[in-house]
Amino acid sequence: MLPVEDRDPADRPDERGLGPLGDNACQPRPFFPAPHQPDLDQLTPRQGLMDGPDDRRGEPVPADEDDRLEAVRRRPEPGAVGAGQLRHVGRWRTTRVRDTIRVVRIGISSLAILFLLDAVPSVAQTIAPGDTVATVITAASILEHTLALSDDSLQGRGPGSPGEKIAQRYLIREMESVGLEPGAGSDAWLQPFDLVRLTSSMPDSLRVTGGAGSLGLAYGTDWVAAAGRQAAHTAIEDAEIVFVGYGIVAPEEEWDDYKGADITGKILLFLNNDPAGDRFAGDTRLYYGRWTYKYEIAAEKGATGALVIHTTPSAGYPWQVVQSSFGGTEFELPAPPDEPRIDVRGWLTHEAASRLVELAGQDLDALEAAAQRSDFRPVPLEVTFDLAFTTELDTTPTANVIGRLPGSDPELRDTTVLYTAHYDHLGIGQAVEGDSIYNGARDNALGTATMLVIARALAELPERPSRSILFAAVGAEEQGLLGSEHLALHPPVPACDLVANLNLDGGSIFGRSDDVRQIGRGKSDLDDLLDRFATEQGRTVLPEEFPDRGYFYRSDQFNLAKVGVPALYLHTGVDIRGRSEGWGAAREEEWVETLYHQSSDEVTADWELGGQVEDAQLLFEVGHAVADAESPPAWRPSDEFAGIRAACE
């Protein structure tokens, strides 16, 4: 997912050792053919996962996978510890101070507070005493799973890695412990699929030649690229670069940036996002504005390659996110033999693109202004480049982890509500201040943990929901939503029997908010249920804070929407209670700028999970209501996905 969000954690500290486990829409086109609150005063010592020093630099973890998994799951002997004392939880300790949970990490020579969060007793008080939601969906339970899934010993949960396998087994055991049954079909928890791993060796410099001379662009600083084909050798010779503006073909907007131009064999230079103004949904980014769409339309048009110009406003994230998320080792699903592809997919910084078009005697600002108009035509730049690189190819097995809560109604239990959260992250990457493990605590250990907690709450209801419910921890999201794509193409139940998808990606770490930010608001009548339960919380549902970033197309619910499943996806509320106006939005921007897709995405002392508890309660209530409703949700008639769902009727 090249940009923006976070993820998973959840369960009961009295039963589980924590330990450190540590876009192609040309038309829009057809898409795809515990029964009580944890008592922290009863926590007892538990075995940690690692006996040696921190493996912050990606060094091998001493214990094998079975030992590490068992350490995180080992149940303690019964016994009490006095209130206010520190209790060991692996190499973590917890202590209760009034209504605050502190998790303290023990270092080799010092004691450092790693985590401080509000246990939010006032949230629980909004729900009737004894209610399953209040006793199961807690900050403590969410925190525990988050810490487990984001620990160093999982080494960033990269696709196909040993850490990913540990995460899979952890998820299976947690799903089984709450009473779910295998949900992947044939009595299986895992839905396996293959990833093609591509590791391309790009040159250190890209030489661009034009009538005014030549220009050298430094890899990483000026440009990054990845292979567009699953081929061992790629050679591009004397390929002309053509500026195509936003590169959009949108008949419903009477917009075509190509105007019949023959761009076969060319390298296309794109602006990111879509044109400014009232068209294309105004400030809301549509799929036309996603960088994935640019590569897809370039392939359809027969181009050889595509370069997207990066700016932080147009992308929604800084250049460092592109550097850490793009190029190097990439993963894809095996490519169908008839799928159109380009040879190379890349990004340029805005400064590098400016120098490139100057070589052609053009001005980038002027070209950008021209691209805002519907009468824009492609501009051949009469500059060329040669690019040759090799790509190591191998196949890596991975899997989605799926649990099922069977429905209770004989008429409705064959239809299914689907919760999703991706459990993967970026694995081990470039070291920053000695830390090469990209833990992905918020993205998306937090989301996955929250899904586990919701699963427990639904499983422990006095009466099972009418419809069945699937909980899918999907893999390879960071590599392009690949796990959810496989799930959508090969669902355990027919896609038409999936009545709704509730996706968790990231979450609230800044405290309780008065607002609920909904990604893709207005797309389906799931809005009505969300509004109802948010009102009961005293909160207001608002459209996403950053509609220009196209979040709906950047997480796993997009793939389910592409097969017609109405989807709900929440983003972090920003009107934080007790904070000044704009504080929450500023913190979110700061997080994206400095921590998103970085090795520093870890649980830190300033996390406050009260807002995540409330969001989890909302998703529990909406999912429960859908599961018990006589009629399933529906897309709004004008939505781009409504026609796909109509085919089910």
Image (cartoon, grey):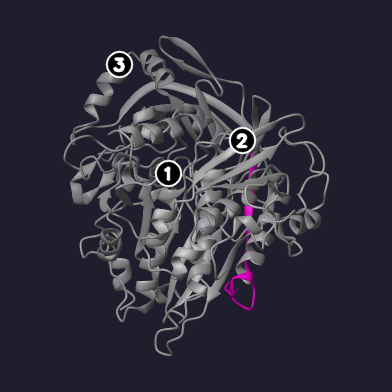
Separation of marks 2 and 1 at Cα, in angstroms: 41 Å
Q: Nearer the viewer, residue 155 or 464?
A: 464
Q: Secondary structure at mark 3?
A: loop
> Which residue was labeled with disc 2?
113
> Which residue was labeled with disc 3?
363
Callout 3 environment at 10 Å: few (<14), some (14 to 19), or many (20+)? some
Residue 497 relative to residue 441: left or right: left
Q: Estimate the x, y position of residue 294 in percent, counting from the top left.
A: 39, 41
Residue 272 visible in the displayed image? no
State which mark lies toward you, 2 or 3.
2
Separation of marks 1 and 3 at Cα, in angstroms: 26 Å
> Vertical placement of 17 versus 191: above or below?
above
Q: Residue at x 53, y 64 (%)?
A: 472
> Which residue was labeled with disc 1?
292
Residue type at mark 2 is Ile
Residue 242 relative to residue 638: left or right: right
Q: Secondary structure at mark 2?
A: strand
Residue type at mark 1 is Thr
Q: Residue at x 76, y 49 (%)?
A: 49
Q: Residue at x 78, y 54 (%)?
A: 65
Q: Secondary structure at mark 1?
A: helix
**Which region shows up in magenta?**
177-199
State which mark lies toward you, 1 or 3.
1
Q: Estimate the x, y position of residue 613 in percent, counting from the top left.
A: 44, 55
Say which mark, if any, is on residue 134. Answer: none
Q: Residue at x 37, y 53 (%)?
A: 570
Residue 285 relative to residue 198: left or right: left
Q: Earlier in the sequence, mark 1 or mark 3?
A: 1
> Vertical placement of 362 versus 615: above or below?
above
Q: Nearer the viewer, residue 488 or 213?
A: 488
